[in-house]
Image (cartoon, rainbow, N blue to C red):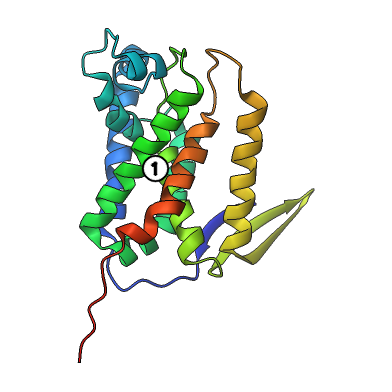
């Protein structure tokens, strides 16, 4: 399934969602133009589990700061495209529900929770983790809880046939979550391997799902 938009209207303009997308794209462009230094920047500002848990590092910044810098870096065009597409589809509704400032804090919180989840499940790894996937997973968790019946326009590939359908968010995001958990369990215990940080997705998703109600502003009764 390949979602590309939803039927969930908003009441405010998603300045923060767009701003995060623009910032990620700008950082990705800087990575591209840095040429041979791109790999160095990944090791300098990516979230390395061993360094985060031990504070032992030769990185130019404190390991805890990489919890934030890593979520604005990406490993390739498809990586950033997929992440920003999901953020655009689902982020505006969470921003609409929380407000601009709370959404910034919520997004960063989920990103940090995701990176820590990955670190705790790969304690000895010295492979840097980068990408907005963990933070966006938190957005998906929040969306699933708040808008489970919202219709998501999704492309389904059936062999040589392509079908566009409107599917409830519960199915689209639920299917995505099952894939993350399954792949995380399959790859658990494989040390120092690059690829997808599945448990970062799982951790971010759980953080967003469990805490979104706490982030919502209190409603004031008016007489």
Q: Residue at x 47, y 14 (%)?
A: 125
Q: Residue 139, can we see it?
A: no
Can you say whether 109 is above or below 212 in the image? above
- Residue 37 visible to the viewer: yes
Instruction: Give the structural element (helix, strand or loop) at label 1.
Output: helix
The total of numbered circles placed on residues is 1
The C terminus appears in which quarter of the rendering?
bottom left
Name above or below for residue 32 compared with residue 113.
Answer: above
Q: Considering depth in this image, is 87 or 191 the residue closer to the camera?
A: 191
Q: Position of residue 102 (x, y in %)?
A: 25, 56
Q: Position of residue 195 (x, y in %)?
A: 54, 23
Q: Is residue 98 above or below residue 84?
A: below
Quarter location, residue 76: top left
How many C-alpha atoms fall within 10 Å of the one at disc 1: few (<14), some, or many (≥20)? many
Say which quarter of the image contains residue 172.
Answer: bottom right
Q: Tell me: 19 left or right of 32.
A: left
Left/right placement of residue 44 relative to residue 115 reads left
Q: Position of residue 124 (x, y in %)?
A: 46, 12
Residue 76 left/right relative to 10: right
* Residue at 33% over, 47% down: 107
Dot 1 corresponds to which residue? 135
Residue at screen point 46% across, 17% down: 123
Q: Nearer the viewer, residue 33 or 66?
A: 66
Q: Is residue 163 above or below residue 59?
A: below
Residue 43: which quarter of the image? top left
| Of 154 and 57, the residue lying toward us | 57
212 vs 152, left or right, is: left
Residue farthest toward the bottom in the current orientation of the protein: 223
């Amino acid at each position: 399934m390949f979602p590309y938009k939803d039927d969930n209207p908003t009441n405010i303009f998603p300045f923060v969602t767009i701003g995060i997308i623009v910032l990620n794209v700008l950082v990705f462009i800087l990575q591209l133009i840095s040429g041979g230094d791109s790999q160095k920047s990944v090791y300098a500002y990516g979230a390395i589990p061993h360094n985060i848990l031990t504070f032992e590092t030769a990185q130019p910044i404190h390991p805890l700061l990489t919890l934030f810098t890593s979520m604005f870096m990406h490993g390739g065009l498809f990586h950033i495209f997929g992440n920003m597409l999901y953020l655009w589809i689902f982020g505006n509704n969470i921003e609409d529900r929380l407000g601009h400032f709370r959404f910034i804090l919520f997004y960063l919180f989920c990103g940090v929770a995701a990176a820590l989840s990955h670190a705790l499940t790969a304690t000895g790894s010295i492979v840097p983790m980068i990408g907005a996937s963990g933070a966006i997973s938190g957005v998906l968790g929040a969306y699933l809880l708040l808008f489970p019946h919202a219709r998501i326009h999704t492309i389904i590939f059936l062999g040589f046939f392509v079908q566009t359908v409107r599917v409830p968010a519960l199915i689209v995001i639920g299917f995505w979550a099952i894939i993350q958990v399954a792949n995380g369990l399959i790859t658990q215990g494989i040390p120092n391997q690059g690829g997808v940080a599945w448990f970062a997705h799982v951790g971010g998703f759980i953080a967003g799902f469990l805490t979104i109600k706490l982030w919502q502003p209190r409603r004031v009764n008016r007489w």
